[in-house]
Image (spheres, grey):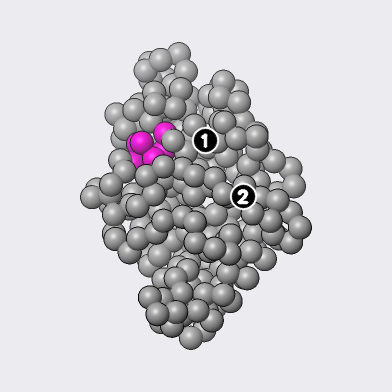
Amino acid sequence: MILGKDVAQVSSSPLSYTSRTKGYETIIDGTAFCIYDTMGLNEGDAGRVPHWKAMSELLTLIWQLNGISLLVCCMRGSITGNCQKNWISIGKIMCRKKVPIIAVRTGLELEENLDKGRDEMMKVLKAHRMHPKDLACVVSFPGNHNQHRELYEQSQRKLRTLIAGSYSRKFLWLEKEKWLDGTSHKVAFRPISRFFGSVFDVFVKEIGMPEDELKETLQQSL
C-alpha cells in the first residue's frame, strides 16, 4: 500500500502471515525510504510465528540496520494486551523512546468517514500507555472487486504524507553491546548470562514477559 503497488503478501486469516522480515525501497516526496515489513507479533497463541521468534528477528534487525527513523504500528480492531506490550517493547525498550511512532488503524472498509472515530482512538491509545506521534485511519484493501478503491487510494496518499512528515531526520543506530549495557534498571540481577541481567529486568518489569520466552528471544538475537 505504502509503495503504491502490491509487493508484500497479506491475508485475512487471524494467523500471522508474514514469516520473514523483508525490506522494500520507495520514494515519498523526494525522499528515499527503505520500509521493512516485519514478522508478525502474534495477538494470540494460535499464530503461525512464535512470539519469541518474531521479537528475536525484530531485535536482530534493529541491530543490523544503518539507522531507524520511524516505527509504524498497524492495528485492526480493539487494542489487546499484546498490542500494548509490543508497543512498549519496541518503542520504549528496544528503541529507547528515541524513534517516533505512528499508529495506523486498518479494517475500516465499511466506514464512509475514515476519520470519524480518530479522536476517540487517540484517547484509547493514550489510555493504554501508547503515545503515537500521529494516527492514520485507513482502508488497506481495495476490495476483491475494487469496491473500496477510492477510499484505498485516499488512504494511501494520507499514509505516505504522514510518513514523510513524521520520520526523524536523526536516525537511531544501536550497537548490540551498547544496547545491552545501556538497558539497565535497578532491580535484582538474574544470572542468565553476563549480558542478560539488566535487559531481563526491564522487559519483565515493563511488560511481564515470561522469563523463559525472554531468555529464548535474547539468546536467538545475540
Mark nearest the camera among 1 and 2 is 2
Asked if the stretch drawn in magenta spans residue 53, the answer is yes
Toward the viewer: 38 or 171? Answer: 38
One can see residue 132 in this view: no
Name the residue at the bottom extreme.
Answer: 112
- According to the picture, the residue beneath numbered tag 1 turns out to be 61
Left or right for 160, reference 124: right
- Segment tinted magenta in the rendering: 51-56
Residue 177, position in %: x, y? 56, 20
> Nearest the camera: 17 or 40?
17
Label 2 element class: strand
Local packing at callout 2 (Cα closer than 10 Å; few below 14, some 14-19, many 20+) is few
| Amino acid type of the residue that numbered disc 1 sits on in the rendered structure | Leu
Relative to 207, say whether 26 is above or below.
below
Residue in view at x 47 percent, y 38 percent: 58
Residue at mark 1 to residue at mark 2: CA–CA distance: 16 Å
Residue located 40% across and 65% down the image:
76
Amino acid on which disc 2 is placed: Glu
Percent x, y of residue 133: 62, 58
Query: What's the residue at 29%, 54% (across, down)?
Result: 15
The residue identified by callout 2 is 25
x, y percent for residue 129: 49, 54
Give the residue displayed 45% in from the left and 13% down from the top: 194
Tag 1, which secondary structure? helix
Q: Is residue 207 magenta?
A: no
